[in-house]
Image: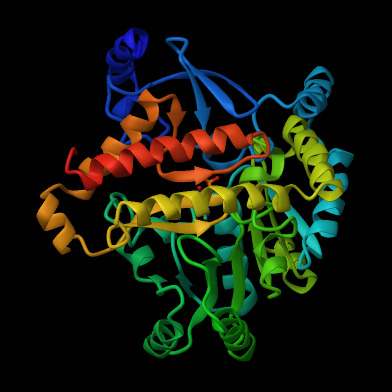
Amino acid sequence: MKLEKSRRIIRVAKKILPGGSTFNKTAFFDEGKTPFCLVKGNKSEVTDIDGNNYTDFMNGLGCNLLGYNIGFINRAVEKEINNGCLLPFASDLEIQVAKKLKKLIPSAEMVRFGKNGSDVLTQAVKLSRYCTNKKHVIFGGYHGWHDWVIGSSSRSGGIPEAEKKISHKFIFNDFNSILKLHKKLNGNIACIVMDLVARYYPEKNFLKKVRDFCSKNKILLVFDEIVTGFRINKGGAQTFFKVTPDLSCFGKAMGNGMPISALVGKKQYMKKFNDVFYAMNFVGEKASLAAAKVTLDYYLKNDVAKEINKKGNFLSTQLKKIIKKYKLNNFIQIQGMSSRIIIGFKNNLDSDFLKKKSADIDQIVRFMIQTFAENKILCNLSVFINKSHSKKDLTKFAKIFDQICYKISNSKV
Ligand SMILES: Cc1ncc(COP(=O)(O)O)c(C=O)c1O
């Protein structure tokens, strides 16, 4: 694989950008052996700076649900750019997009826009604190880069202790972990924030128990639908699982790659934004609103979620068969949901398998990513399916995964 330009640009990038890039989801892409810079995307394909084409399963981290360079979205964006993209007042596009969200999402009585997932999740937390007059937040996983989430992570540099003391993680599917926190915090919980399918589906009754618990204890239930929104179902995970949150957050696929997000929720809470400050320069920018308008319209008229989940089901069935064929079930696991498959590992890092292989997970992840890249597939093991993926793309993915599993099972890593 030709990677000369990628290699050259890494040296320059490291001098001017800390870590070489602001984009941080490529930690396991070995420098010099995998592409560093991408220049173009078209449907399900991307092109790197050296001119190599890849079938892309990273999908703008799940944002490009319809694929890259989609004509009708480009035209809508272009029109707003030509009309002056950021005007000092609101545009009627806000109302049009809000109405479409309302049609798609059961709990969307009112809407407030943002630019990314972190914006709207953090606003949901702030609004919950105000509405409940309570302080602590409990959450399930990754919900963005802001202090209340990252305080409990291994990269919590710069986050004050005071913030860490009021944000707490619960264990997904473990209702007792919520009860324990509730007791420890004397009920002083403003909201429970959860992504409904990160690696695992909610177990039977878990969501219902959490919903009832929140209602009973005056805690706001906030669904993080940044990944699940428009993907697991056109109405999000709340429609798929038939549980209604108080507030919920959408982003990623909302503008098919344009930066826009939304906090939606019950009127009784959303109207309190009169007292809760939330504003930013670029939030009324019309190119992203226009992209959201036509993208949501497309979701309303076409069941894209159904289509991509069908494709994902096909792929995950193939991947599971391959794992079984090479007897890797105790090591590699297919997690996530059909249209966002996570190639995961069983948590037992000191399992017999690993002892036998004497390789660590990182090394195997790097090997997988590099082998995919050498075979012209871009994938960081979080496999996003988009509408543009063809059966051929999925079959190619499964074929390379077979080669990878063959090598792992034959100790060639
Ligand atoms: C489940 C979930 N919530 C929130 C976020 C934060 O979104 P953003 O990076 O747009 O701020 C992400 C990011 O990918 C996410 O996966």
Q: Residue 25, can we see it? A: no
Of 348 and 62, the residue lying toward us? 348
Quarter of the image for the N terminus: give it: top left
Of 305 and 239, the residue lying toward us? 305
Of 261 and 74, the residue lying toward us? 74
Left or right of 292: which side holds 204? left
**Residue at horizontal 33 percent and vertical 24 percent from the top:** 20
The figure's colour scheme reads rainbow
Residue 59: image location, x then y, percent: 55, 36
Quarter of the view holding residue 50: top left
**Residue at horizontal 54 percent and vertical 76 percent from the top:** 190
Residue 166: image location, x then y, percent: 40, 71
Q: Residue 11, can we see it? A: yes
Q: In the rendered image of this protein, does residue 376 appear above or below residue 149?
A: above
Residue 195: image location, x then y, percent: 54, 63
Quarter of the view holding residue 256: top right
Residue 349: image location, x then y, percent: 19, 60
**Residue at horizontal 44 percent and vertical 55 percent from the top:** 320
**Residue at horizontal 57 percent and vertical 86 percent from the top:** 209
Of 6 and 87, the residue lying toward us? 6
